[in-house]
């Protein structure tokens, strides 16, 4: 008997078929331990240092209309974070890019939020020595989500400035993307208590730092300022600098005082989860006339336009039948 001819499609990874507790999870596909699983099936050990000590790093890239946006920059940041935490990945950059693409393709999503994670892992003896732990790579794709909902994108976010201070960079280096979010989550609760949509935290000097999953920009007299240090150097923040160069707008990373933020002509926040999102109220007071400003609108429309440009985007490799 001759071996069945292998069709190109059979080379495509398959989702492991096991009991699927779909109702309690968003749609999506995860990759763990060499397998692609429905999100509801993907688990990590309770002994993983990523869970026990937040000893993990990650990166999030999005897919819009079937294309990754600035995947190379996200992979650069992820590999840099991993090595600075003295972790090791057993997968190459190309293998990780293929895993991310497969997670999206298997989920069938055209617009997705895609996370790659490296945890310290489990020490087989439960020793306290991080060098004994076996680092672990995981990834998943779920439907695209945004910091701002549709109404907030149209009318602007109402942001509260919290009394909770952002973890200082001398304690946890924010340029290594991390899950140290207790300050940010407490800040979000404060924002809700005060009728806001979301929150900005200050740094040790009392200047504005960042919010839960986003950077912030103030526009004054046509020039943009975003906090220089004590924040994650966001890929969307970097993209705003690139777009400003194209539009001949002045943009700088410098200390941003609370006073400068409150007195700005326009304010917006930036994140892979939502792009460039307007802020029109701070602690109940309108930013300028309280409407979404022209610089924010211009940058935002160019930002979404660039999602189909080959220069900044990479197509997801969907299985042949979905093409
Ligand atoms: N700041 C923090 C703390 C974040 O977690 C994120 C993204 O998750 C950002 C800023 C924005 O970064 P990016 O534009 O790369 O999504």
Image: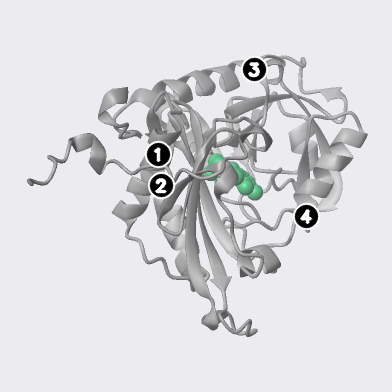
Ligand 1 is found in the corner quadrant, namely top right
Residue farthest left in this picture: 2
Q: CA distance from mark 3 to mark 2?
A: 28 Å
Q: CA distance from mark 1 to mark 2?
A: 6 Å
Residue 19 in the image, given as x and y percentages of width and height: 56, 43
* Residues under numbered marks 1 and 2 in contact, where contact means CB atoms less than 8 Å apart: yes
Q: Does the image show residue 253?
A: no
Residue 169, image quadrant? bottom right
- Category of crowding for the residue at label 2, using alpha-carbon neighbours closer than 10 angstroms: few (below 14), some (14–19), many (at least 20): some
Closer to us: 198 or 6: 6
Residue at (62, 30) in percent of width and height:
146
Residue 260 in the image, given as x and y percentages of width and height: 75, 36
Q: Which corner quadrant holds the C terminus?
A: top left
| Mark 4: secondary structure | helix
* Residues under numbered marks 4 and 2 in contact, where contact means CB atoms less than 8 Å apart: no
Residue at (78, 47) in percent of width and height:
185
Q: Which mark is residue 70?
A: 1
Residue 317 shown left or right of residue 87 in the figure: left
Q: CA distance from mark 4 to mark 3?
A: 32 Å
Q: CA distance from mark 4 to mark 2?
A: 27 Å
Foreground mark, 4 or 1, reads 4
| Mark 2: secondary structure | helix
- Mark 3: is the Cβ under 8 angstroms from ligand 1? no
Determine which residue is flagged by label 2. 73
| Mark 3: secondary structure | loop
Determine which residue is flagged by label 3. 293
Q: Does the image show residue 251?
A: yes
């Amino acid at each position: 008997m001759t071996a069945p001819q292998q069709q190109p499609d059979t080379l495509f990874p398959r989702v492991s078929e096991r009991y699927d507790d779909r109702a309690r999870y968003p749609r999506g596909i995860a990759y763990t331990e060499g397998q692609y699983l429905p999100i509801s099936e993907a688990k990590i050990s309770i002994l993983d240092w990523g869970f026990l000590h937040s000893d993990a790093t990650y990166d999030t890239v999005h897919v819009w209309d079937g294309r990754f946006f600035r995947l190379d920059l996200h992979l650069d940041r992820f590999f840099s974070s991993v090595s600075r935490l003295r972790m090791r990945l057993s997968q190459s950059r190309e293998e990780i890019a293929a895993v991310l693409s497969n997670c999206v393709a298997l989920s069938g999503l055209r617009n997705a939020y895609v996370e790659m994670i490296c945890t310290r892992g489990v020490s087989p003896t439960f020793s306290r020595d991080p060098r004994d732990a076996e680092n672990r790579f995981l990834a998943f794709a779920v439907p695209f989500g945004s910091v701002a909902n549709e109404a907030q994108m149209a009318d602007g976010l109402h942001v509260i400035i919290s009394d909770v201070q952002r973890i200082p960079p001398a304690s946890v280096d924010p340029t290594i993307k991390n899950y140290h979010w207790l300050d940010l989550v407490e800040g979000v609760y404060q924002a809700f208590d005060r009728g806001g949509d979301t929150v900005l935290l200050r740094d040790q000097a009392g200047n504005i730092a960042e919010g839960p999953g986003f950077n912030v920009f103030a526009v004054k007299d046509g020039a943009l300022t975003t906090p220089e240090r004590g924040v994650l150097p966001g890929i969307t923040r970097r993209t705003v600098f690139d777009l400003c160069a194209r539009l001949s707008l002045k943009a700088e990373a410098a200390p941003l005082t609370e006073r400068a933020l409150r007195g700005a002509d326009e304010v917006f926040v930036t994140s892979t989860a939502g792009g460039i999102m307007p802020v029109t109220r701070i602690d109940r007071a309108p930013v300028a006339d309280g409407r979404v400003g022209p610089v924010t609108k211009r940058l935002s429309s160019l930002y979404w336009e660039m999602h189909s440009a080959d220069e900044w985007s990479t197509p997801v490799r969907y299985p042949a039948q979905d093409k």
